[in-house]
Amino acid sequence: MLVSEVSIQSPEQLPKLADLRLTGEFDPQIKSSHPKHRYENSLKGEKYIVKAGPSQSVRADFIGNKIFSALGLSTVPSAIDINPESGEPVLIMDDVSEKYKPLSLAAGSSFRNQGLKLGDFLKDPAQRELFKDSILATILIGDYDRVPWNLMAAKDGSNFVHLDFGASMGVRARGGYNGYSLHIDEEEIRMALRDPYDREPNANELHGEVIEVTQNGIEIKDKERLARLSNRMQTVITDSVIDSIVAEAAFPDNATSEGKSENRMILNRALSQLEAGLAREIPGSLSHLKTERAITTYKCIRDEYNGDSAAYFSNALKTRRDELIKMFGQPDISEQTTA
Ligand SMILES: Nc1ncnc2c1ncn2[C@@H]1O[C@H](COP(=O)(O)OP(=O)(O)O)[C@@H](O)[C@H]1O
Ligand SMILES: [Mg+2]
């Protein structure tokens, strides 16, 4: 299986927030939209980064990370914990700054103008192939932000890790809401792979070598890879894997009356924000489309899933997985047959 070797801790060994000591702010020169702090485990001296932000972003980041890593794609080991002060979830991640270099931009610079391309820094063909293998996972979680600054490359150039799945699972990159449909259709694939700034047809040119998003629809370019990846997805992303990832994501428990009312409150607040946003947005714009799709998603959770977000996301992951397997799977292609 194509998995780059990452010699960092396995997620089971990650500590709880209570075991850690705050050591400082995250580097201000690294472009960041969610609050991050550096922590240390006093006993062992290990370093961590704790990423906060809206609870929906933290959960999306966690679920995306787990799905990617279950599929053998390298991520930074991450765990979720509740910050006792805020009562909100945070992501605890290994601090990989010593081995990996940021591919992010200087604070204040515009994403739109920096022209950073994946192919420019993933020069090793094997690493480029590995990146392309993230395409199906990207579509499964509905991530539209698999861009260079959400990867870190090993300082010795031998591998890279994926990070920041905060623009997936019904959430936008800066914490707003997005659609996360129960079904995959062509529009879903376009949304996941399209450049968020409409600068290029695809968010990055390497995914564009597998599926090209064009004005008229999507064009499949690497059928064999998609078949191999969907076979892998079928083997690895079982119902119980999805259930346990979603259970770990710390959604309010809809079975208790407190959890249920918290879920309702969050959904009603999200929906009123979205409806106000829709009135301000230009029909036909990408943002308007995302808002419309978000309204459909969150109304469905509130009205058809009894406000149970965890049940919705777990069901949507299963349905989408099955549909991707049906769309791209081929029984005769095994994982060993390609690159
Ligand atoms: N675990 C980590 N270890 C070291 N650096 C990190 C880690 N996580 C993020 N970074 C650096 O911080 C930048 C922003 O992190 P990211 O998770 O993308 O947050 P945001 O949601 O704010 O964009 C990344 O581009 C990367 O350079
Ligand atoms: Mg980011």
Image: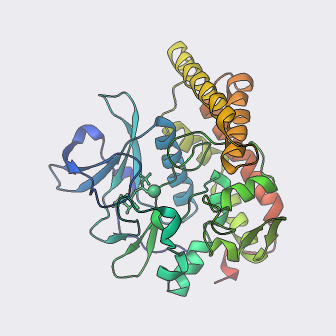
Q: Quadrant of ligand 1?
A: bottom left
Q: Is residue 270 above or below residue 150?
A: above
Q: Position of residue 90 (x, y in %)?
A: 38, 40
Q: Position of residue 154 (x, y in %)?
A: 37, 75
Q: Nearer the viewer, residue 264 or 18?
A: 264
Q: Nearer the viewer, residue 16 or 127?
A: 127
Q: Position of residue 232 (x, y in %)?
A: 67, 65
Q: Name the residue located 69 percent from the left edge and 77 percent from the top edge.
A: 209
Q: Name the residue located 17 percent from the left edge and 54 percent from the top edge.
A: 44
Q: Position of residue 3 (x, y in %)?
A: 52, 72
Q: Nearer the viewer, residue 82 or 298?
A: 298
Q: Is residue 137 above or below residue 303?
A: below
Left or right of 296, for residue 206: left
Instruction: Say which quadrant the N terminus sits in.
Output: bottom right
Res. 180 visible in picture: no
Total labels drawn: 0
Instruction: Say which quadrant the C terminus sits in.
Output: bottom right
Q: Name the residue located 74 percent from the left edge and 53 percent from the top edge.
A: 188
